[in-house]
Amino acid sequence: MLKHKYVLDPWSIIENQYDSSNMIDSESIFSLGNGKIGQRGNFEEDFSNNQTIGNYISGIYYRDKTKVGWWKKGYPEYFAKMVNCPNWNKIRISINNTLLDLNKCEVLSYNRELNMKEGWCERKVLLKNDKSEKIEIQSKKFISIKRENLGVINYKIKVFENNVKVEVLPCIDVNIRNNDSNWNEPFLETIESLSKNNLGIVKSNIINSNFEISTFFKTEYLINNKKINSSYSQIESKHLIGCKSKFLLNTDDELTIFKVGGYVNSNDSNKNEFNNIIEKESENALKTGFNELCKENIDEWSKVWEHSDVIIEGDIKSQQAIRFNIFHLNQTFNGNDPKLNIGPKGFTGEKYGGVTYWDTEAFCVPFYLGTKHSSVAKNLLNQRYNQLDNAIKNAKNIGLNHGAALYPMVTVNGEECHNEWEITFEEIHRNAAIAQAIKKYINFTNDHNFLDDEGIKILIAISRFWKERVNYSKVLNKYVILGVTGPNEYENNVDNNWYTNYSAKWCLDYTINQLSEIGNRNVKKHESIIKENNLNNKEISNWKKIIKNIHLPYSKDLNIFIQNDGFLNKDLQPANKIPHNQRPINQNWSWDRILRSPYIKQADVLQGFYFFEDHFTKKELQSNFDFYEQFTVHESSLSACVHSVLASSINDIEKAYEYFVRASRLDLDDYNKEIKQGLHITSMGGSWMSIVEGFAGVRVSNGKLSLNTKIPNNWESYSFKLNVKNRKLSVLITKQETKIKLLQGKEIDIILNNTEITINQ
Ligand code: BGC
């Protein structure tokens, strides 16, 4: 039985064991953020064991010059990486002239709690330092949702003897570098820094860009909860910006350092206004006081939970996990700023650069669509719309013209950043995920204006891409797509990846259907779209030829679609034959061995069954599921959730549950042994999908909402809210029944477990 590292609790993640060498893992778990700024769960005081200090601002990135062994034409010049900013959290402490460093202390008791309901993290440690002096520290902190530039720390030091000399240096640590840097270059440089009494400001310039940021903090001291005036002395340090204060404490005295801090940045504030904003925000925060700020933040979190909570009765493990996932999704992205997006690791780690992948459309849009105002998902789609010209340039770069658009594998502003040819040029299925998100958005919102003005242009350009990318095979008498990588990145440069070919067919078909839907609704609009996009009958009839004649590899004997040409030639040993100590294979096997193996990193054919399920029978789904599941090693976080949704569709609830647990507890239980690199934020959207689309079977098709509800054996009930078709619904599913209430909007006809019903207030 798997042992859970963190205490099972419905609303909190609790760490009650202290293991100095594994704090780097927990730093990921205890990360905090508010959609704009975020940070790993680092200790405030010095810590000399393994750690990754991480503080990030969404949308503030460095262009890290591409570094590859063999330059291929078409590679991008840079990889956009969010910048690890100066650390405003730092508090250097010394007790009787000894630096406080948990790694060098005897820890007598330790408890850290991330309270997801209220959005704060608290750590209490009782320790003896190397001079056997007993000290208690207690730090409570949060990143404010309402005051988007601001984080808040209340740090307490309690002593148990008389005449204890305590020196504290609340400061900004500028000695921070991105860990993931191609040339080991700094990403930012200090323009000016200031430390005066209780205030510290560091203004920095992101190298090779126009971005500027200011990191700041301001403090206040209290002894035994009474504000005190302290004296401040300047320190000599190149790296730490702040002033030191000294205190003499007696038995049971408690010193509190109330520190507010954070960042302002030039993406949304005028550079010349930085100091004014800092002055106002920090002064106002200090005046408001820790308790009020915390209360204000709890209120904000309660609004977030009001819309997005999923309540599970009867299974604390699942309850904790889904809330952990929803909490981090909300910490990473809130939809307030149309310029921002969701990095695969959010603010919790640097892998993947913190920028946009197909993950957003395929795994996150459903969550934000279902739990937030429709403008949030629309903003995400509009970003792709605003980047259409760059996607067209991107396709041109690899030799595809005539208005074809290839959206980047990785991007921040529409320019491609990825630089491994087998993915950059070949993992082209990402285009289809964008079209899928448009479809979901339109189905959920009926926002025809978006389709008419923006969506259709994206769809046309994506269709043109597929037209350019296929070629006609005389041997097969079919259109083929050669040299691609499917979602399964453990096989590259394959021909006729079924998922990619099917996606191409679907995109072309969907675009044609949407054009005629627009025509039926608004003839004039249709005409102007045709004109503006230079569409003619010949082009559309070419698309139709491809739809009809694209090669979709199929095995009659096995009654399955073949993942790609040649897949069945592999030595088809199921993944359960791989010795346990060789998993995950990407950490144990040579790349060559992985490529030749039948092992599938993540849902591939099955990703197609997820997106296109209504094109196939349950029997077809079952045989493809049975065949591919046995070779799938789920070494991408994006795999388990898709398997969970599909297992629900074929009524294998036990399996759907297993996959749901794996998806939602991936980080809490560290399935892939990589948690120190950060959390898998985008796949957290998949955990929500496993419940809402999986167990509850929520779909919108042919203009109608339907639910096909199931419940895992060990759950007594589960409930959630859903924004759909300008309504807000609450859904409660028990073992006996499903109750749907209309919370907002007009009555609506839906299909519940194959029966039409009307939901009204
Ligand atoms: C997956 C991709 C995904 C990326 C970022 C990779 O491991 O294979 O599908 O886009 O991670 O999450």
Image: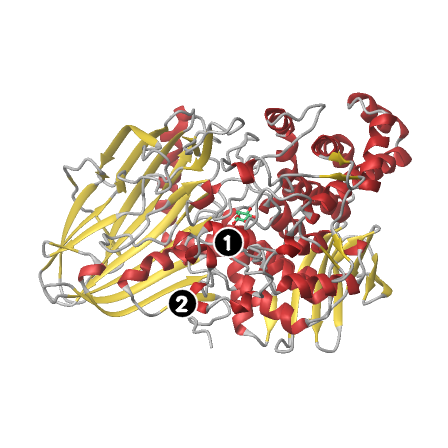
Percent from the top left, x then y, of residue 289?
36, 51
Residue drawn at point x = 55 percent, y = 34 percent: 339
Q: Looking at this view, is 727 or 426 the one in front?
A: 426
Whichever of callouts 2 and 1 sits on the residue coming sooner in the sequence is 2
Kind of residue at badge 1: Ile
Percent from the top left, x then y, of residue 297?
47, 53
Picture quadrant where residue 478 is located: top right
Q: Left of 532 or right of it: where is 31?
A: left
Look at the image and tell me whether residue 300 can be seen: no
Looking at the rendered structure, the secondary structure element under dot 2 is strand
Q: Left of 270 or right of it: where is 623?
A: right
Q: Looking at this view, is 357 or 681 the one in front?
A: 357
Look at the image and tell me whether residue 590 can be seen: yes
Picture quadrant where residue 732 is located: bottom right
Q: Left of 588 or right of it: where is 405?
A: right
**Which quarter of the image is occupied by the C terminus?**
bottom right
Q: Which mark is residue 594?
A: 1
Query: What coloring was used for the rendering?
Result: secondary structure
Instruction: Tell me the mark number nearer the camera, choosing from 2 and 1.
Output: 1
Residue on which the image places disc 2:
14
Please say if the residues under marks 2 and 1 sit with CB atoms less than 8 Å apart: no
Where 680 sits versus 377, above or below? below
Picture quadrant where residue 108 is located: bottom left
Residue drawn at point x = 33 percent, y = 53 percent: 42
Kind of residue at badge 2: Ile
Looking at the rendered structure, the secondary structure element under dot 1 is helix
Percent from the top left, x then y, of residue 723?
70, 53
